[in-house]
Image: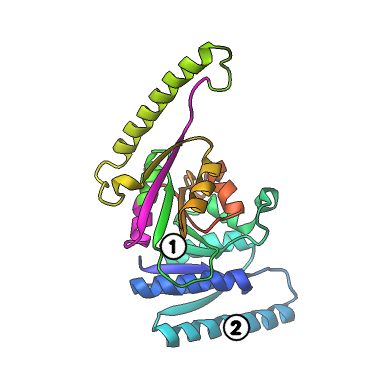
């Protein structure tokens, strides 16, 4: 990881993202790029005044980080539609990771739709770290929700790269066929059989998914749960300390404008902790 881009609105959540970015950059000797996007359309004199003031503040933050941590930090001001400028800047800077602050209206998924974070997440070609918790401590406990896809496998590799010393737990949720349609006395026996088959299939899927990566996740850190994914993830985070949740977005590329997966969207709208959203590579 050579370049980390932090998109900040210069409010509280932006400052949280900045501190997380500084901690990650320091641990990897990476360049830290600070970006603030201002809207276009102001009169020329006001535009120049605002841009100068914003750059002075951003450069002040960059100078502080250089002096405190010995980081290579650059400050950028972009002009235009925020999510489009952020995506363009990722490419222009050659960033390996994007960090943004968490959404400021937790629990309201309808408000999350169409926000800068969602628009960036569904089109971003590099991992996106949504920073919720205000700490600069290294990640120590990571939970990865997997559907056994190649995209989820890439997310596991990315998580290990970002937090190499952390304990990584895997969570896979599976469903039992016919559970909602069977009735009567036959239901119990059929359901027991189908549940056994579904569990066995999930166990096989986990083994296949981890092929070659078994050393990253210990045998006791592989959870298979019958149930709905988002609810199971939140319950797992409540029951075991977790400071980073990792999900694959299943977005393909910026041009495809693929929809952000429902699981990732539901979690990012009300993040239970920091979230790393990892897009699959072009070849996945």
**Looking at the figure, which quarter contains the C terminus?**
top left
The range drawn in magenta is 157-178
Q: Secondary structure at mark 2?
A: helix
For the point 58% across and 12% down, which residue is it? 184
Label 2 CA crowd tier, 10 Å (few <14, some 14–19, many 20+): some
> Is residue 230 rendered to the left or right of residue 31?
right
> Is residue 173 rendered to the left or right of residue 257?
left
For the point 41% across and 56% down, which residue is it? 142
Task: Locate residue 72, reporting x and y percent.
Answer: 40, 79
* Visible residue check, residue 119: no
Task: Note whether 160 is above or below 49 in the view shown.
Answer: above
Mark 2 / mark 1, whichever is N-terminal: 2
Question: Would you name the residue on which mark 1 appears?
Answer: 97
Q: Which mark is residue 207?
A: none
Task: Locate residue 65, reporting x and y percent.
Answer: 47, 82
For the point 46% across and 70% down, which residue is it? 21
* Visible residue check, residue 269: yes
Q: In front: 185, or 57?
A: 185
Q: Is residue 8 magenta?
A: no
Distance CA(mark 2)–CA(mark 1): 23 Å
Task: Locate residue 78, reporting x and y percent.
Answer: 58, 70
Question: Would you name the residue on which mark 2 appears?
Answer: 57
Task: Note whether 10 is above or below 281 in the view shown.
Answer: below
């Amino acid at each position: 990881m050579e370049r980390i881009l932090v998109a900040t609105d210069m409010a509280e959540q932006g400052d949280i993202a900045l501190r997380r970015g500084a901690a990650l950059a320091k641990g990897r000797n990476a360049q830290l790029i600070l970006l603030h996007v201002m809207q276009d359309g102001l009169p020329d004199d006001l535009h120049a005044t605002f841009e100068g003031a914003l750059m002075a503040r951003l450069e002040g933050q960059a100078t502080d980080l250089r002096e405190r941590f010995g980081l290579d930090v650059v400050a950028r001001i972009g002009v235009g539609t925020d999510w489009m400028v952020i995506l363009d800047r990722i490419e222009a800077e050659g960033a390996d990771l994007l960090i943004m602050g968490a959404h400021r209206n937790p629990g309201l998924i309808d408000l999350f739709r169409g926000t800068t974070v969602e628009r960036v997440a569904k089109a971003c070609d590099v991992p996106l770290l949504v920073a919720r918790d205000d700490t600069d401590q290294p990640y120590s406990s990571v939970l990865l929700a997997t559907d056994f896809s190649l995209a989820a496998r890439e997310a596991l590799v990315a998580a290990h790269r970002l937090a190499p010393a952390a304990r990584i737990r895997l969570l896979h949720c599976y469903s039992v066929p016919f559970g909602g349609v069977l009735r009567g006395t036959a239901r119990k026996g059929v359901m027991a059989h189908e549940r056994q088959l579904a569990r066995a299939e999930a166990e096989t899927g986990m083994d296949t998914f981890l092929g070659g990566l078994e050393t990253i996740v210990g045998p006791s850190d592989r959870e298979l749960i019958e149930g709905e994914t988002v609810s199971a993830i939140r319950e797992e985070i409540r029951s075991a300390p977790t400071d980073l949740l990792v999900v694959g977005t299943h977005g393909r590329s910026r041009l495809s404008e693929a929809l952000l997966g429902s699981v990732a969207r539901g979690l990012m709208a009300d993040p239970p902790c920091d979230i790393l959203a990892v897009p699959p590579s072009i070849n996945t």
